[in-house]
Structures are given as C-alpha cells and as structure tokens.
Amino acid sequence: MLLRFTRTWLPALIVAAGVIAMVAGGFSDTALEGGAGVIGAGLSVWLLNWLHRLGVSGDDERSAEDEARAYFDKFGHWPDEAPRRERGADPHARPGARGPG
C-alpha cells in the first residue's frame, strides 16, 4: 500500500500542489514559476521511481539467467528444452561429432 502511494500518488499530489499554487497565486509570474518548480519536483519523484523499478527488474532477469545456467550445468540441457535422449539424439555420441555418412 505504501509502495503504491509512493510510486503513483505522491508524485501526482506534488504535481497537483504545483497546479494549485499557480491558480492560488492568480497566475502571476511568481506563482507560475513557483508552481512550475513544484510540478518539476513531482515529475522528478515519478522519474526516480520509474528508474528504480527499471534497475530492479534487471536483477530479476539476472537471477533467472543464473538459475537457468545452474540447471544447464547440472542436467546438460536448458530448462525449456527436452533432454537429449528425448530429442532423438544418440546418448553416446560426442557433442559436435558427425553421424554416419
């Protein structure tokens, strides 16, 4: 709940406060500049949250890749592939060796 508030609602509230500051100031130059600064802060909060989520998603992909490599090292095939015997290959053939013919 708190995470959703921080990611979505906090930046929206900051931007809304900037718009309210502009309106409350009667759209004077000072109100417009101050409101624009507050809106920029709200957009900065949103951008930092987005960049953090982007960076964290790479960690999940790396973990999945590490698990797949460990599976390959243990069983000799990737998790989404059938074992070599089920694919119809000769289990005694050397990898990369040519067949008869």
Image (cartoon, rainbow, N blue to C red):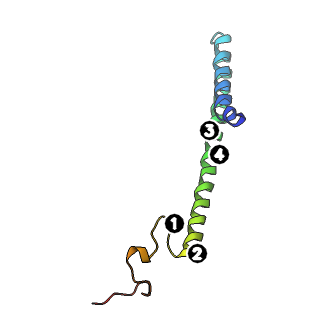
Residue 48 position, x and y percent, is 65, 40
Q: Disc 4 to disc 2, how far (Cα)?
A: 34 Å
Q: Can you see residue 29?
A: no
Q: Disc 3 to disc 4, how far (Cα)?
A: 9 Å
Residue 52: mark: 4
Residue underneath mark 2: 74
In the rendered image, which quarter is residue 24 located in?
A: top right
Q: Nearer the viewer, residue 80 or 39?
A: 80
Q: Indicate the amino acid at tag 4.
A: His
| Lower position in the chain sequence, tag 1 or tag 3 | 3
| Lower position in the chain sequence, tag 1 or tag 4 | 4
Query: Looking at the image, which residue is at 37% across and 77% down?
Result: 88
- The residue most toward the front is 86
Query: Looking at the image, which residue is at 68% across and 21% down?
Result: 34
The C terminus is located in which quarter? bottom left
Is residue 39 left or right of 99 when viewed as pictured? Answer: right
Q: Disc 1 to disc 3, how far (Cα)?
A: 36 Å
Q: Indicate the amino acid at tag 2.
A: Lys
Residue 15 position, x and y percent, is 64, 25
Dots 1 and 2: beta carbons under 8 Å? no
Q: Disc 1 to disc 2, how far (Cα)?
A: 11 Å
| Lower position in the chain sequence, tag 1 or tag 2 | 2
Dots 3 and 4: beta carbons under 8 Å? no
- The residue most toward the left is 101
Residue underneath mark 3: 47
Callout 2: helix, strand or loop?
helix
